[in-house]
């Protein structure tokens, strides 16, 4: 399961409204090689399902990831932090053994 915190839900809803996205759009999350810790998160809005997509609906937000990325993201919570010291969207990932200082990459 992938989870969406209230803070992330609020920001996702705001972005969807600001960009005038239709109801068929969802949040796509994936993990790619790269970053200072070895693996990086990617997040975008998408409206096309792919084979082997894993689909989750938490807190009223549809989150989709590919099967390979889900192995790294299982039980991860998408969160958002705003303000002067905020870091935007970030992932609270219990599978990460270490993360980099910027929070953009991780290792398992």
Image: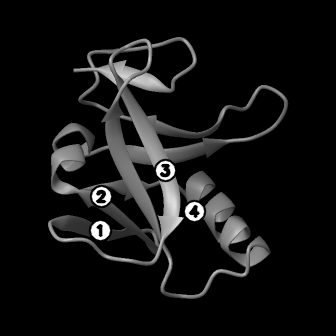
Q: Which residue is found at the position 78% from the left and 25% from the top? A: 85
- Residue 74 appears in the figure: no
Residue 86 point in image, percent of width and height: 73, 32
Q: Which of marks 2 and 4 is nearer the N terminus?
A: 4
Q: Which mark is residue 65?
A: 2
Q: Dots 2 and 4: beta carbons under 8 Å?
A: no
Rounded to the nearest angstrom, the CA distance separating label 3 from label 1 is 15 Å
Q: Which residue is found at the position 36% from the left and 21% from the top? A: 106
| Secondary element at tag 2 | strand
Q: Which residue is found at the position 33% from the left and 36% from the top? A: 32
Q: Which of marks 3 and 2 is nearer the N terminus?
A: 3
- Residue 88 appears in the figure: yes
Q: Dots 3 and 1: beta carbons under 8 Å?
A: no
Q: How packed is label 1: few (under 14 Cα within 10 Å), some, or many (20 or more)?
A: some
**Label 3 sits on residue:** 43
Residue 103 left/right relative to 31: right
Rounded to the nearest angstrom, the CA distance separating label 3 from label 2 is 10 Å
Q: Dots 1 and 2: beta carbons under 8 Å?
A: yes
| Secondary element at tag 3 | strand
Q: Which residue is found at the position 57% from the left and 18% from the top? A: 102
**Label 4 sits on residue:** 9
Q: Earlier in the sequence, mark 3 or mark 1?
A: 3
| Residue with the most extreme bottom position | 23
Rounded to the nearest angstrom, the CA distance separating label 1 from label 4 is 14 Å
Q: Earlier in the sequence, mark 4 or mark 3?
A: 4
Rounded to the nearest angstrom, the CA distance separating label 2 from label 4 is 17 Å
Q: Please name which of the two marks, 3 or 1, marks the residue nearer to the observer.
A: 3
Q: Please name which of the two marks, 1 or 2, marks the residue nearer to the observer.
A: 2
Q: Which of marks 1 and 4 is nearer the N terminus?
A: 4
């Amino acid at each position: 399961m992938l989870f969406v915190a209230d803070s992330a839900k609020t920001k996702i809803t705001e972005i969807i409204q600001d960009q005038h996205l239709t109801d068929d759009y969802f949040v796509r999350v994936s993990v790619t090689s790269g970053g200072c810790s070895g693996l990086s998160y990617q997040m975008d809005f998408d409206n096309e399902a792919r084979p082997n997509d894993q689909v989750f609906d938490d807190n009223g937000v549809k989150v989709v990831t590919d099967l390979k990325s889900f192995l790294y993201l299982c039980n991860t919570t998408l969160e958002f932090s705003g303000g002067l010291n905020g870091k935007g969207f970030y992932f609270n990932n219990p599978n990460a053994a270490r993360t980099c200082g910027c929070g953009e990459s991780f290792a398992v």
